[in-house]
Structure formats: C-alpha cells, structure tokens
Amino acid sequence: MQSDEHVRIFVVEDDPAYLKFLNYILTLNPDHEVKLYETGKECLDNLHNKPTIITLDYSLPDLSGEEILKNIKEFDPNIHVIIISAQEKIGTAVNLLKLGAYDYITKDEETKDLLLNSVNNARKNIQLINQIDHLKQEITEKYEFEKSIIGNSDAIKKLFSLIEKAVKTNITVSIAGETGTGKELVAKSIHYNSQRKKKPFIPVNLAAIPRDLIESELFGHEKGSFTGAITRRIGKFEEAHEGTIFLDEIGEMDLNLQAKLLRVIQEKELVRIGGNQVIKLDVRILVATHKILAEEVKAGNFREDLYYRLLGLPVILPPLRDRDNDVIILAKYFLDEFSRENNLGKMTLSREAQEKLMKYHYPGNVRELKSIIELAAVMANETEISSGDINFSSIQKEDRFTFEELTLRDYTLKIIRHFLEKYDNNVLKVAEKLDIGKSSIYRYIKEIEEEGNE
Amino acid sequence: MSNIDSELKQPGYIDLSYLKEIAGNDQTFIVDMIETYLDNIPSDIKEMKSLLADKKWNEIGDIAHKIKPSIGFLGIHMLKDTVLQLQINGREAKNISIIPDLIAEIERVNESVIKELQETLNNEYS
C-alpha cells in the first residue's frame, strides 16, 4: 500500500527563503517526497519524473506562471498544480483556475494551513481519479461484446458484425427489439467498445420520466426558469459531452420535444431552458424503441425528419424464440452466474428441462429466461434441474389456457391462435407442430376470424 | 533560561513568533531561515543600490517583491510597508523620487536586524 500513500511533490519557487519554508511544511508529512526547483525550466525538464502535485510560484524569473501551467497541463493533465502567489489580483487567480490550476494560494500568514489543506484535498482527488480510471477499465472489460452478449445463433452473429461496424464510427444507431432482448446492453457494448469509452455513457429512459420534466432532464435549465427550478441544472445531453447518450423508448417522446431534439442534433448545440448561453455539444446518439418507428411516422406520432436523422445504422435485436440453441447457451450462462453468486455449487440442466426450455416462446425474451432459470435453480432439490423445476409464468393470456374454464372448442381456438402467433402465421409449421392437417388449421383460422367479426 | 531573557527583552526589530509557531520545537528550521536571510538579503540590498544608479526601477521592484516573504517570516514588521511600497513604485515606475529613500530605510533597518539575528543565533540557537 506504500505506493498509494507516497506522493511526489515538486516545489517551484525562486525565493530561497520561501523555498525552504515550503520544503519544511511539506516534508512534515513523511508521505511527501519533495523536490525543489528554482526555475520554471528546471521544473519542466523534470516532469518525466512524474510528480503528482506541483506547487508553483506565480512570478518566476524565467517563465510566466501561466506558461509553465500550460506546459505542465499539456504534459499530463492529471498533475495537480497549486499556484502560490504574492499577487492578490482576483482576475489572475480566476484565469489560472480556468487554465486548469487545482488551487490558488496567496503568500501570507495562513499559507501553511491553506497549503496543507490543499495538498490533502488534491491527494483525495487523485485517489478518486485513480479509482474512477480503475472502474472504467473494469466496465470496458465487462462490456467487451463477445463477453456481454451471449450466443452463437446466426441472428446473434449478424448482430455482432453490425456492432463491430457501429463502434468504428460515430454514426447514430437505432436499436429496435422486443422487451427483454437487451437493447441497453447493446447500447453499452457499442459505447464501451468505441473511441468514446473513457467518456460518459448516459442512458435516459424517456418512458420513465414524467412528460413535463423530459425537456429539462434532457437539456437542463437555468435557475428560476420555471417554478421549482431553484438551481441551475445540467441536462443529460451536457452530461454526455464527448461521450454517448442513449435515448431509450424514443417513440414515447412527444412531438414538441421532437422538434427541439431535432434542432439540437442538427446544430450540435443547445440552450438550457430559460438560458441564453449557447452550449456546444459533441455527443454520440444511440436510440432504442420497442415500437416500429416507421409506423409511428405513418401514424403521425413521430416526425419524419427526426426519424431519418435518428435511423442511422438500424440494429434489430432478434427475439429469443428466433435464436435457436442460444436459449440453452443463455440458460446455462444464467444458471452458472446465479449459482456462483449464491454459492449453490455447480448446477446442470436435465435433458428434459432443456427440451422444455426450447419449446417455450419467451414473450419476455432474455429477461424472462433469466428469471425462469433463477426460479428453477431455487426450486431444484438436486444439483440437476428437472423439467418440473421449470415454470413459465408469462403474463400473456394465451398461455394461461387453464386459468378460465372454456369449452373444448374455445380451448382449441386459443391453442391455434397461440401457435399461429408463435410461428408468425406460418400455417405449415403450426400444422406440423400440432400434428394435424393444414386444412384443419385453415378451418380454425376462418372460425377465429368469424368470431372476431361478431 | 535564555527564553525568559528574550521574553523580557525590549521589543526589537524581529519577531520570530510566526516561525516558532510553524516549527514547534524544531530549531534547525528556524536557524535555517535566519541563515537564509543573512545569506541573501544583504546582497539583495546591495544589488538594489547598484540598480538605482542605472535607474532600473522595474528590476528594483522585482527584488523588493522577492525579499517580501523573508521580511514576513522573520517578523520585521517595521519594513513591511516600506518593501511593499518599493515593489509598487519600482514596478510601476511611479514616485521614483522616493525610491532611494525607501532603499536607504531598508538598508538602515537591515543593519540592526542582522545584529539582532546574530545575537539570537548566538544566544538561543548555539
């Protein structure tokens, strides 16, 4: 842990008395390794020794404080520079802080306390920065997409090749897919594998924010711009500067706001609500929807111009029922994950359990499969999960055949309807699955249609 | 003890309370600061006098700026305003007529300061 505590500090100061003074108070803490330099050039020439903190006298004989600060920040923006100055002009201080100085301290009776405080704060700040870097690295590893998106069906392989294309550029990506297919996971994979991975990924679910608040949530507001706006607020777009914003359920956005979003995307800048300052933006946009946007455009619920702006590279996530054997791969993955997290030891799926899983149509997709597996792992009495441990509790009515008492004919129609839906109205396939003739299926379809017309 | 002596003594040109507060019982730091003053300030004053002849006001202001902290550390309160004024007048080249007087005042006080510092070194820190 010693490396964590150890801090290398450069002191740059031309006045010998002050140099001694700073050296004395900084070396009071044995964690500090202090190096002394009398000129700006000496300091700059030694930056390769990687100081964590530099205390910099503002007026040195050879170079101006501003110049040295710029050079240090160019060399490594993470070096914390504390300016120590006898100048007491506020303008100078503000300017230096804007240029990236960490703190500004004047030479007076309180210098000792101020400096030690500042150094301690800088150290805490540095620790946090290191921690964040570490976590970012972990996230990046977590979202390597081969690791986070599980499966090897053709549909998923196609998805991988699309994501690979998406990460190479800043193109807008529109992700479509049923609920539970992993739209946010794909968005994260694109961000954390792109050039922007070190910058923020900001997800916004437009369906989860009250309609009246969406505008200020996205674009921010100035203090006092409306009742309740008691402080200035930075919007999600600004938060995502240089990174990626993920607009989930974009289809839920109302038409007024669509106009504003379109302007922000086109101009690459925004103005906070109630403000007049124009804020430049460099934000990559990913959107997702479970609706089919083209149809929303036709229905007049979605602006056509915005639709084309956002369409970019369309990625359609396959529903789990179209992913063949991925069901089993995913089931095993979730089972391993769950048993590891809950110390259940190694668990397996019996052949019958696997067959049962393959037959189901998963209206809730991967999310549903995950909960089915977790429940099965809890219910299982042995380390092997039997078909009896697998329970489908889909909320779709068609699955609850026996919940209500019906005539045999009505049951039959329900079954036919369910299979037609599951196999995209493919009559041949339904006939094969139910092991009856296709003419029977057509007859039932007619009956269903007649029932619908009643 | 010599400490009692110094407390009973008439107020002199220097006031080491600030340094003592910082250094606690660490005498080497105080000695170091006194020696740094003795090593640098007399030659700084000499340099200002020679700059005076060349009318290099700005450089004089710079030196005044540089010696300001030392004046502060050793608590030479009497010179605080003088040095600050010299810095301003020099750097802004205004009221240059009083610059020679300001330097002479610093030199005069400095002579007494040096004597007092040497006494202090001999009596308290030897």
Image: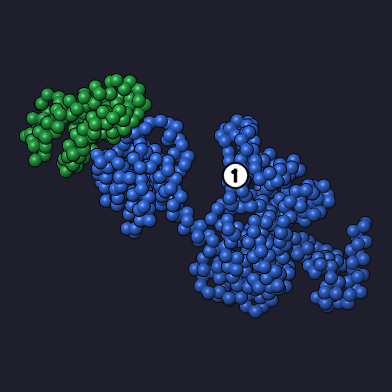
Residue B87: % across, % down? 31, 28
Residue B114: % across, % down? 14, 32
Q: Chain letter for blue?
A: A
Q: Give the number of callouts.
A: 1
Q: In the image, is B15 to the left or to the right of A149?
A: left
> Against A379, is A244 above or below?
above
Q: Chain letter for green?
A: B
> Against A436, is A29 above or below?
above
Instruction: Please give the residue where the numbered disc 1 appears in the rendered image.
Output: A238
Q: Looking at the image, can residue A185 be seen? A: no
> Against A17, is A321 above or below?
below
Q: Residue furthest left?
A: B1
Q: Quadrant of the N terminus of chain A?
A: bottom left
Q: Quadrant of the C terminus of chain A?
A: bottom right
Residue nearest the viewer, comparing A385 with A166 = A166
Residue nearest the viewer, comparing B63 with A9 = B63
Residue at 35%, 56% in the rendered image: A49
Q: Amino acid at mark 1?
A: Glu
